[in-house]
Image: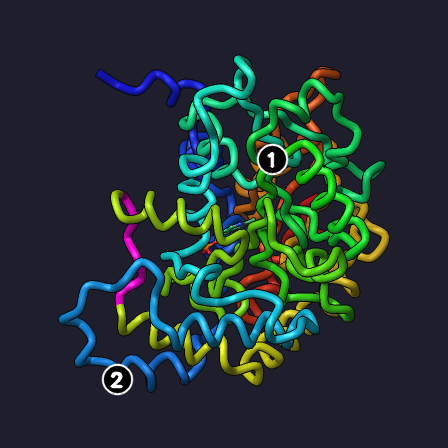
């Protein structure tokens, strides 16, 4: 007795990577290195240890779904400062919920907003192609049809939802939009985001802006979905934004993020979480509160990534379509055949990278828009990153 919708989503990309590489032994004495996983390895900020040590008395409490007033206020302040919002644009007590990493929120939101059918038709969920795999898993398990919208060099690696036909848009229940994009690192302007919000309101679907790479940027802070709402007059209707401490504060193991947005949807999200949610434990919420209140460690973290991209500029300029991304910490390199390149890097240089093909689906045109690319995560220290990039350049 297994939910047969699981057959629609297939194996997770990292399982596919293990299946591709693990039966091959590298033909080199060099120690294995991995740029496959987007898991920041910078040391956690001191705030984490300090706040945790001071919060021991909180382990005896079940965490409330809405988190604490302190957490909501910290996120509210952060959003207001980061995106230049007026403090009274929205009420944090009705619009912000902490989550145990945004992955679970992206997933659970599908079960909050996708109905059985839309005017008698199968609900659609829009997502970029390539995409963060959780979008597909959520859509499929919630019984919706996934609509893969190409995010290729022709569209600055961002999906153009406006290009879809009216029939599809009218039965869309949910759309995921990732900016800065994983894996390609491009980011959308506030005007572009505002036009997507307008599209969502016109066709009455929920738009989720997945923004967990927003604080790792090159020069200009990327625009955000909430900024687009401010530009359109301040309402959060139909809009949710999700952000996370995993990348911003280099604490993927803390499992801490938030959802902010339309109060009506948030009330329903709370209802879903009453039944199936795992809200962040109170001591971890105290840590998260302190991290959202601090920008110093974030600026240091960003500067650290910038030095790694300087290194990538030196080593990869003019090779494999290299470009320095607007945001995030991935290289998205054009290598022709992504599986062949990943296998060669592993066999010849003991270097693990992930084929872009595993992040994308073959579209209606018969092409997989990730098939020519590999994704490399610059999540290690400078020295390790330099070594890995040298191996990559020498091998490819
Ligand atoms: C695009 C994107 N969204 C969401 C997440 C989830 O991050 P977390 O659950 O750590 O907040 C990730 C993690 O890699 C991601 O790449």
Looking at this view, name the residue that lies furthest to the left.
60
Q: Pointer 1: what residue?
A: 205
> From the viewer's perspective, is residue 302 above or below residue 161?
below
- SS assignment at label 1: loop
Label 1 within 8 A of ligand 1 by Cβ: no
Residue 365, position as x, y percentages in the image: 75, 16
- SS assignment at label 2: helix
Circles 2 and 1: CB atoms closer than 8 Å: no
**In this rendering, which labeled residue sits more in front, label 2 or label 1?**
1
Say if the magenta span includes residue 279.
Answer: yes
Say if the magenta span includes residue 70.
Answer: no
Where on the picture, by quarter, is residue 219?
A: bottom right
Could you tell me which residue is drawn at 40 percent across and 27 percent down? Answer: 141
Q: Residues within 10 Å of mark 1 (few under 14, many from 20)?
A: many
- Is residue 333 something that shows in the picture? yes
Q: Residues within 10 Å of mark 2 (few under 14, many from 20)?
A: few
Could you tell me which residue is drawn at 26 percent across and 19 percent down? Answer: 2
Residue 310, position as x, y percentages in the image: 74, 69
Q: Pointer 2: what residue?
A: 53
- Is residue 24 something that shows in the picture? no
190 on left or right of 246: right
380 on left or right of 52: right
> From the viewer's perspective, is residue 185 above or below residue 155?
below
| Label 2 to label 1: alpha-carbon separation | 43 Å
> From the viewer's perspective, is residue 50 above or below residue 169?
below
Could you tell me which residue is drawn at 64 percent across and 21 percent down? Answer: 362
Nearer-N-terminus badge (2/1): 2
The range drawn in magenta is 276-281
């Amino acid at each position: 007795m297994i939910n047969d919708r699981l057959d629609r989503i297939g194996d997770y990309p990292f399982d596919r990577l293990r299946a591709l590489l693990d039966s091959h032994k590298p033909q080199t004495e060099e120690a294995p290195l991995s740029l496959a996983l987007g898991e920041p390895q910078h040391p956690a900020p001191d705030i984490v240890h300090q706040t945790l040590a001071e919060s021991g008395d909180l382990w005896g409490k079940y965490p409330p779904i809405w988190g604490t007033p302190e957490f909501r206020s910290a996120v509210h302040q952060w959003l207001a400062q980061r995106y230049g919002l007026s403090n009274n644009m929205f009420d944090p007590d009705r619009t912000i919920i902490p989550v145990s990493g945004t992955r679970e929120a992206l997933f659970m939101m599908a079960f909050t907003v996708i109905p059985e059918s839309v005017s008698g038709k199968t609900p659609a969920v829009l997502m970029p192609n390539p995409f963060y795999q959780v979008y597909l898993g959520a859509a499929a398990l919630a019984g919706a049809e996934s609509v893969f919208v190409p995010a290729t060099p022709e569209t600055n690696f961002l999906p153009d939802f406006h290009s879809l036909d009216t029939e599809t848009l009218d039965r869309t229940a949910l759309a995921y939009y990732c900016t800065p994009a994983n894996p390609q690192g491009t980011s959308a302007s506030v005007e572009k985001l505002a036009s997507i919000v307008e599209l969502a309101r016109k066709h009455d679907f929920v738009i989720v802006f997945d923004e967990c790479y927003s604080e790792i940027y090159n020069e200009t802070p990327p625009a955000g979905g909430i900024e687009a709402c401010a530009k359109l007059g301040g309402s959060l209707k139909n809009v949710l934004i999700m952000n996370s401490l995993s990348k911003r504060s280099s604490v993927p193991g803390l499992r801490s993020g938030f959802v902010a947005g339309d109060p009506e949807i948030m009330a329903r999200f709370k209802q879903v979480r009453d039944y199936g949610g795992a809200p962040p434990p109170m001591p971890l919420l105290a840590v998260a509160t302190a991290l959202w209140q601090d920008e110093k460690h974030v600026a240091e973290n960003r500067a650290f990534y910038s030095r790694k991209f300087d290194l990538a500029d030196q080593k990869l300029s003019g090779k494999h379509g290299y470009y320095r991304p607007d945001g995030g910490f991935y290289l998205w390199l054009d290598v022709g055949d992504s599986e062949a390149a990943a296998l060669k890097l592993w066999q010849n240089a003991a270097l693990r990278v992930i084929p872009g093909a595993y992040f994308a689906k073959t579209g209606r045109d018969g092409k997989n828009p990730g098939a020519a690319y590999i994704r490399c995560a610059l999540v290690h220290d400078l020295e390790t990153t330099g070594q890995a990039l040298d191996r990559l350049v020498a091998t490819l």
